[in-house]
Amino acid sequence: MIIKCAVKSLLTIAVLSSYSGLTSANSKENIHIAPEVAKADAHIGYSEIPYLDKAFIDTSPKDKQDGIPVGKLGNYGGNKKMLMQFANDLAAYKHGHYDSLLISHKGKLVLESYYAKGRANLPHYQASATKTYTGLALGRAIQLGYLSMEDLDKPITSFLTELNLDKSVKKSANKITLRHALTMTSGIRTSDAQRAKIDQLPNQLMGQGEIKTLLEHSSPITSDSQTFKYGYGPLLVMHVLEASVPGSAKDFIKKELLNKMGINNFRWRTNGASGLPEAGWRTSMTSRDMVKWGTLAMNKGKWQGEQIIPEKFITDGMSRLVMTGDDEVHWGGKDVSKQGYGYFWWGVNLNVGEKSYVGISAQGGNGQLIMIVEELDLLIVHTANDNSIPFQQIIAEHILPAFI
């Protein structure tokens, strides 16, 4: 049974669950422990997770020695009363179905909370936030010298040497640069019927055959078609990564990026057709590890003092290089405008009264979000399971005012 219960304490409220194998933290010594699944149940999927009986809200998160500095809400600015009211509202489902909300301010995690199906140690499914992780993996390859910033303006065909395209198709494909792929402006266009036909050709999709097949079924690529369209960019980037790094893209991502940040409790599925890691969805990350991705970006590609992604790749990629228009601002509202796109990062203006703040985010369907507001030295992470929520409007309306 789902019990929707408002949080009544300003301190941590522990989990009480009757589900066998889930942590029950109802004693004094466990009051500061976030809800977790037992190791024996770590394999269970999101759909099998029961709802929490009570939400967990911690305004002084535990230092887990995981690379995330922690602090106490209010010690570095931030209106604790306003944020606790918002957290209570989330616990009462007044804003829809959130699974977690974490806030880092001035480099320290000051709020960690879990609701509904949120668990501290269980990776939450990630949809298109995966695109941002894929882009950062490419940045890691540049930092290590397997690619260069200059390579961003080279055709993807110069890296994908196994395509073996017909002359007319190759001429069209040569117009697609790596930068086009990163900004979703590749120009590849396939109809639903063409996409369905491609999906019926599994034997032709292994390795670079996937890109070859897409190019052969795409309409001709022109300057008119190379406008923003959410689609094949991450796929192209993953194939370039596979072709450029030693070993496989899968091993490279794990060794050179995830291991670097101490991300070891994750899931990153393999694309069954191509054999490569999924590029645009189908990963799972814990909420704390999402904080790590955001911290890496806020620190301009540095992790614990080491430059693991070029600063220019980060600053360029978090800029609004392509404006996507205000007609369909994703998860927007009256206070969200000027939507744009970088290297798999979204950008918007978040308006609070007469003041406007730039919000840069990695976004995944149903509410996986990593939002950076540099002017306020603020990082907001949440997971959810409700695509109808105007998440960015809620941030502008209920979170930013607490830090202004």
Image: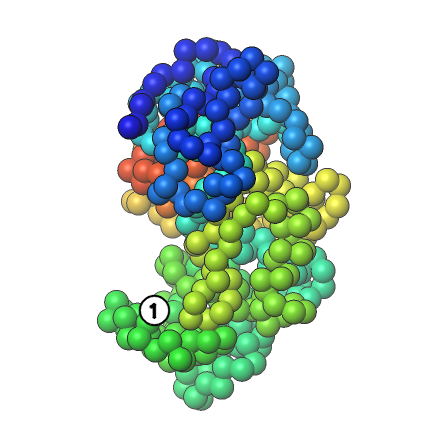
Q: Residue at x 67, y 64 (%)?
A: 148
Q: Residue furthest left?
A: 193
Residue 112 locus on image (x, y percent): 52, 26
Coloring basis for residues: rainbow
Q: Quick check: 352 left or right of 315?
A: left
Q: Quadrant of residue 233?
A: bottom left
**Count of numbered badges drawn on the protein:** 1
Q: Quick check: 184 left or right of 68?
A: left
Q: Residue at x 48, y 51 (%)?
A: 283
Q: Amino acid at mark 1?
A: Arg
Image quarter in which the N terminus is found: top left
**Image position of 231 with respect to 121: above or below:** below
Residue 56 locus on image (x, y percent): 47, 22
Residue 213 locus on image (x, y percent): 39, 78
Q: Residue at x 34, y 18 (%)?
A: 5
Q: Residue furthest front?
A: 20
Q: Residue at x 45, y 28 (%)?
A: 114
* 362 or 109: nearer the viewer: 109
Residue receiving disc 1: 189
Residue 2 locus on image (x, y percent): 30, 27
